[in-house]
Amino acid sequence: MMIERLRKQALLKRPMSLFLSILKTLKFVCRTLAISIPCFGVLLLLAKAAKAQSLGDPVVNITFGAGTASHAGALTAGTTNYTYSSADFPIDGSYTIENTTNTPGTWWTTTDHTGDTGGYMMVVNASAAKTDYFYKKTVSGLCGGTTYQFGAWIMNLLRSQDNSPPNITFSVTTVSGTVLGSYNTGQIPITSTSGKGIWKSFTFNFTTTSSEDVVIQMTNNANGGAPANDLALDDITFRAYGSQVVASLGSSSSATSATTCAGSTQAITINSQSTLASGFVQKPQIYTTANGWVDIGSASTATSFPISIPSPAGTYLYRLVSASSDNISSSSCYVASNALTLNVTAGPSADFGYTASNCLNDVVMFTDKPKANGSTITSSVWDFGDGSATSSTPSHVYATPGTYTVTLTVTSSTGCTSTASHAITINTKPVAAFTISSPNCAGQPVIFTDNSTSVDGAIAQWIWDYSDGTTETLTTGGTHTHTYISGGNYNATLTVILAAGCSSAATTKSVSVTSLPSVVTTFTSNTTANEAGCTNNAKTLTVTAAATPTFISPVYQWQLSTDGGTTYTNITGATTADYSFTTSISAGTYLYRVVASDAGYSANCSVTSSTSSLVVTAPPTASFTYAAATCLKDAVLFTDNSTSASIITAWMWDFGDGQTSVLQNPSHVYSVAGNYLVKLTVVNSAGCSMSSETQAVHINADPVAAYTFTTPDCATQAVTFTDASTTTDGTLVRWIWNYGDGKADTLSSAAPHSHVYTTSGTFNSSLMVFTAAGCQSTFVIKPVTVNAIATVDFTIPDVCLNDAYAQFTDASTISDGSQAGFKYLWNFGDTNATSGNPNTSTQQNPRHKYTKAQLYNVTLTVTTANGCVTTKTQQLSVNGENPVANFAAASTQVCSDAPALFTDNSYVADFGNVTKIQWYFDFDNQPAAVEEYNDPVKGTTYPHNYPVITYPAAPKKYHVVLKAYSGGTCVNITDGYVTLLPIPIIKFDAITPVCINAGTVQLAGKETSGLGGTTSYFGKGVTSDGIFDPLAAGIGTTNITYTFTSTAGCSESFVQQITVNPVPTATITDKVTILDGGSITLDASIAGDTTGLVYRWSPSAGLDNDAILNPVASPTDDTQYTLTVTTKAGCNITATTFIKVLKAPVVPNTFTPNGDGVNDVWNIEYLSSYPNSQISVFNRYGNKVFTSVGYPVPWDGTMAGANLPTGVYYYIIDPRRSGRKAVSGYVTILR
């Protein structure tokens, strides 16, 4: 894996550049992979290219935490794990702790140097000159006389105009100021890869003189300026640095891994491949998830350390650590070797199966089913428990019964063995035996008695084969029966099986079965097995028996059953082949049979005959009803209501008029009205009959329809109809009239009534009448002749006083074309008429001169050749002398794409109306183009469309003329002008669909001809200047109107549709907590349409699937996951959740509260993640010396303010309400 690969690279002694690359990569791996070992402790590094060296675990590891803090001065105590000068910090900015920079225009956009989005770095925004340090921290707990390697990462954040690149001096000094080591970076220029800034690693070594505090200080030596000096600092480390320590596992000097199995006695050693310096010792360690690297042996100068094979199976890590003998006990002092891997497998697992048949002399098959569990099975040894064994997959035959223990032993390639044993029992087979009853007859039960035996277990099954095609398996022995249907010789076989599965040999015996005759009974009356009788008609019957073949010496006994064959009773004295009896008067079913045998046979060989059945039935009850419709020649419906205990099979009707029927529900038509007696006789299936009482039926006579009507004249005149109908049976109650013109009436009175024919012609009228009994007459039909009338019409002339006369024109018509026979009479309605200018005329098309301007009622009367008279009156307006022509234009300047609107205001001054107007809209260019309107209404607006003018064409002026008429010769003219303006040409392209959460969109309509003017938009969700807000518009399709209005006021509009696509709502818990190594299903949910959604989680690390809605997350560190949901329309939404990973507290087993500033308190790593935890510490007497809920202040080894003595104390740490179990152990106080 990656750590192993890096370790091997170090062993190849590659140069320092490789070390820096490996260190960067390894730090990222340790943060992102599910690895809890201190990665830096398993890597062999080179301090210099000239000589291989080793490093220890990080003593100082400043990663700048996991939070954000900034300041404009000194930080508040406890805010971060480093300090600042109280003054002289850069005057123009602040120091910030953050996980990314995001100033694309000025700084590189970057994460911390590992690329971990959860990692943090220190950003120094410092463009001013800086002579004091920008970072300072005091470090405690280092070992005396020990060389350490200082490391830090720096990035020049500026991405352009780097006036003064950072120039950093790192130094490590004693508290008093003695320099132990320093390093100057020189100018750190702007560098980038793929558009990202480059982190640079800087290291140097220093050696402590004694166990004392040291001070880290960083100073920027660059000049001021803007932009300048902006930089990022990340991951400051101290690690012990010393001679190379190389370890191997097992006999090979280059082996770094080995495999064994749990419980193996194999000898495995950790071997040192390095030469120790004088005064140095080494010791082996094993890595545990609970306590990290733990000593498993004492420190010495030995080069080989044996280890015990751990359990359970798993992967175990080992290493050697080395330091001077006086420093080897402190993890801050030693360097570590490469890591060694021991894979402990579970070892083999033996198992086998065998066949179920465990019977004496049967072959038992054994099947080997071992599990290798990661190794290879090299041998298998069988022991069958009877002194025999084999090493192959076996079968075995046991010679004697009994219980045997079978054992299988398997050995794996790692030398591990496993044994499996099963006990099997070998049983003696049972013996089948039975007896059979005798003699036996066909159709009679044969008795079988089991006599089988077993000396080795109980018999569980008896398998019988009767050799007549019938077999059965019984679970009990004893006695049972089987019936053979036919006579003959049969071989019965029995096989028995023990509960253990052992089966006996089959035992067979012969069975002799005698055949009996077949006996059939019939009635002599009909030679069948069935007979019927009636309760009201007893009769004598004889039943007889016939045997085939015949008996030699027959013996008979007749039996009777009255309960449907459930029980039969012997009939006393009925012991011959024939039996006679008289039928019962009680209804029911009587079953007769005979039991026959032969005096020469055994008593149990008898045969029962077939059954003869006598059914005695009660007679039916005859009854019927008939429908009430009893009119002559109507069918009378008769309904049978008879009842019977058995099926009625025949009906005989007598209708009383000499006619009959055999139908169940007949109908009958009487030919003569009157009264009749009807009778019904019925017969059931037993032949029993019964007649009904007679019922009287009355048949009514039909009425006779008759009527008269007045002599018809002309269409639209009323015709009177008078009834003259009669009846001899009852009264008339309804009259149905049909007038032959599609109209009809149903009346309840005989009173005369009228009907109007609207058209001329001959119509067949008719009448049908009904009596109160529902009898109806036939229709009587009479023709009605209706003459046509004239349709009077004439034209009213337009006339004024100046006209010579008013000309009237007849327009009358008639449907039969007889206009030539018309007679005319005109009345002009003129009270001022004279004998020379009369008020009436008989001409078809007369003239009349009116002398006064007013309204007149003109009437025309037309008489047809048949004398039908029709009149029509119309109003004539005689107008005054001349009209006044007048109109108004809605605007004298009109946009050319809109109609010009002209309102007619012409009138007649003294009396009357304008009768006609004529418009000339382009009189100068098209004087013959006219639009004429008759009987115009004053105030009517007339639109006219002129040719469209577009920019840059100039406006165009048109001459408009109006002529107004009030009669044939009375006319007046007026005119005016209108100017047509050019219109804009606009473009408004189709709008791409948007998502509702996309934010505002600027729409882009435009005028293309260059015409000056203003733009506006209208529609849901859009502002007048074209900014469209999908959220305001809402989901769906919306019409957006773009309008351009010229400076002259001419506008053009165009409508486009914009579709706003919906997005679903994504919700997820903001923050969840899991245990280190645990997992959780992310509880994202989607509200809304989920069709075609695409899911993507970021980062994908720690997820089982980053493309589903609810993946399982197993992060190793605190992680913020972002879900991006994309709809099928391409719309995106996001939701985030933060997973807090609760790491197991790392509990030190020793601390030294002696006031030297090193390990003075019991610091428990990760315990701050458990604010509800309870910590209790006890002395060796069981007394509680310390307790705390939460751990805000680490324990300093005191109780009630007094120092506790040096010694070992027992602790219990309960991370309550976190899902973790309580941990306990021992901590040592050293002073």
Image: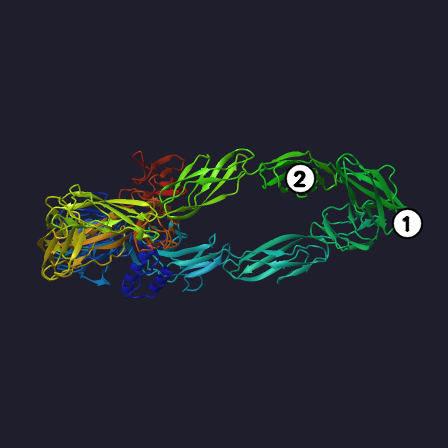
Q: If the image is split into quadrants, where does the C terminus sit?
A: top left
Report whether 291 appears left or right of 143. Answer: right
**Residue 412, percent across and down?**
53, 60
| Observer able to see residue 970 | yes
**Residue 760, percent across and down?**
37, 48
Q: Amino acid at mark 1?
A: Ile
Give the residue at x 59% y 61%: 380
Instruction: Report the residue marked by disc 2.
Output: 657
| Observer able to see residue 461 | no
SS at mark 2 in the image: loop
Q: Nearer the viewer, residue 834 or 261?
A: 834
- In the image, residue 704 above or below residue 331: above
**Label 1 crowding class (10 Å Cα cut-off): few <14, some 14-19, many 20+?**
few
Residue 552: mark? 1
User: Badges 2 and 1: C-beta atoms under 8 Å apart?
Assistant: no
Q: CA distance from mark 2 to mark 1?
A: 67 Å
**Residue 141, percent across and down?**
28, 48
Report whether 414 appears left or right of 1133. Answer: right
**Label 2 crowding class (10 Å Cα cut-off): few <14, some 14-19, many 20+?**
few
Q: Nearer the viewer, residue 175 or 32?
A: 32
SS at mark 1 in the image: loop
- In primary-sequence order, the first of circles 2 and 1 is 1
Q: Nearer the viewer, residue 140 or 538?
A: 538
**Residue 1181, percent across and down?**
41, 35
Q: Amino acid at mark 2?
A: Asp
